[in-house]
């Protein structure tokens, strides 16, 4: 199974070489991420691909994560501050258009989303949206590994700075996690040849029969 071997190959890259990712490969990662599992299919988050080097320097200033600047591309996963009726209605319209059905046929589904999601507080929904972004992040990591593209997921960044520089607040979003993509610097990254360490499956997994 190539996926297993590719996941053994990947690690959280500490130093990138500066080599650029081909646009076609980047789009494959983004397409795979778009197809990731998402509760109810609502996808309550957005992804910003930061290519501009000067902007990445601003984003990474003062950070202990040089990958923000070194990488080929930086993906910023941002979750919705709140989920609104408009989000749900737009989603219903999109389903109807994609499946070529009348939007009225989705009345029960819409009612379930309205009752389940809009009954929660904005902070509860933001936390839920952030978890959906993390699921998508996992898909992006696997997709990158399949293409032998290196990646580094990061939480240790200045979210307020990211939100300001990317104007996320005006878009009703908050940054939750970032992903650097590129190619490892095999000469200067001391982690390149280290054996990947994970639990034995017997310690990680319990079968309940």
Image: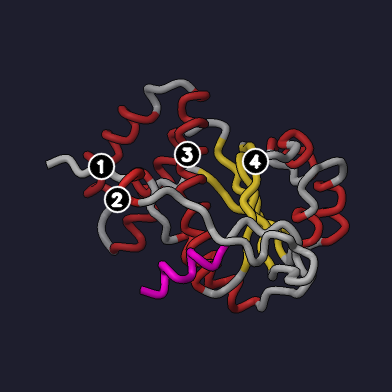
Element type at mark 2: helix
Element type at mark 4: loop
Q: CB atoms at circles 1 and 3 under 8 Å apart?
A: no
Quadrant in which residue 180 is drawn: bottom right
Q: Which of the two labelled residues, at mark 2 and mark 1, occupies the earlier sequence position?
A: 2
Magenta run includes residue 9? yes
Left or right of residue 92: residue 52:
right
Q: Measuring from the top left, give residue 128's x and y in whole percent.
A: 45, 34
Q: Measuring from the top left, give residue 112's x and y in whole percent.
A: 27, 34
Residue underneath mark 4: 155
Q: Which of the two labelled residues, at mark 1 and mark 3, occupies the earlier sequence position?
A: 3
Residue underneath mark 2: 103
Q: CB atoms at circles 4 and 3 under 8 Å apart?
A: no
In the image, 124 versus 108, the foreground residue is 124
Residue range in magenta is 1-10
Q: CB atoms at circles 2 and 4 under 8 Å apart?
A: no
In the image, 157 versus 185, the foreground residue is 185
Quadrant in which residue 116 is drawn: top left
Residue lying at 37% horizontally and 30% vertically, measured from the top left: 117
Q: In 3D space, how far apart are the residues under numbered discs 1 and 3 (Cα atoms)?
A: 24 Å
Left or right of residue 135: residue 1:
left
Q: Measuring from the top left, give residue 97's x and y in whole percent.
A: 35, 60
Q: Is residue 61 above or below residue 31?
A: above
Q: Which of the two labelled residues, at mark 1 and mark 4, occupies the earlier sequence position?
A: 4
Q: Residues within 10 Å of mark 2 (few under 14, many from 20)?
A: some
Residue underneath mark 1: 206
Question: Mark 4 or 3, which is nearer the eye?
Answer: 4
Q: In 3D space, how far apart are the residues under numbered discs 4 and 3 (Cα atoms)?
A: 13 Å
Residue underneath mark 3: 131
Quadrant for the C terminus, please: top left
Q: CB atoms at circles 1 and 4 under 8 Å apart?
A: no
């Amino acid at each position: 199974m190539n996926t297993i071997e590719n996941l053994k190959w990947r690690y959280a890259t500490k130093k990138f070489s500066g080599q650029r990712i081909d646009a076609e490969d980047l789009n494959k990662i983004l397409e795979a991420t778009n197809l990731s599992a998402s509760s109810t299919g609502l996808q309550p988050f957005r992804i910003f691909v930061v290519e501009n080097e000067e902007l990445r320097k601003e984003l990474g200033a003062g950070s202990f994560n040089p990958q923000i600047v070194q990488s080929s591309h930086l993906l910023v996963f941002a979750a919705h501050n709140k989920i609104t009726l408009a989000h749900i209605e737009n989603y219903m319209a999109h389903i109807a258009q994609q499946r070529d059905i009348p939007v009225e046929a989705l009345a029960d589904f819409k009612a379930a989303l309205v009752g389940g999601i809009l009954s929660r507080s904005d902070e509860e929904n933001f936390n839920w949206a952030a978890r959906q972004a993390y699921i998508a992040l996992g898909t992006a990591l696997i997709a990158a590994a399949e293409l032998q593209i290196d990646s580094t997921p990061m939480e240790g960044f200045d979210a307020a700075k990211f939100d300001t520089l990317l104007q996320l607040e005006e878009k009703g979003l908050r940054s939750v996690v970032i992903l650097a993509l590129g190619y490892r610097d095999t000469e200067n990254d001391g982690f390149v040849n280290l054996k990947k360490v994970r639990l034995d499956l017997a310690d990680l997994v319990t079968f309940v029969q």
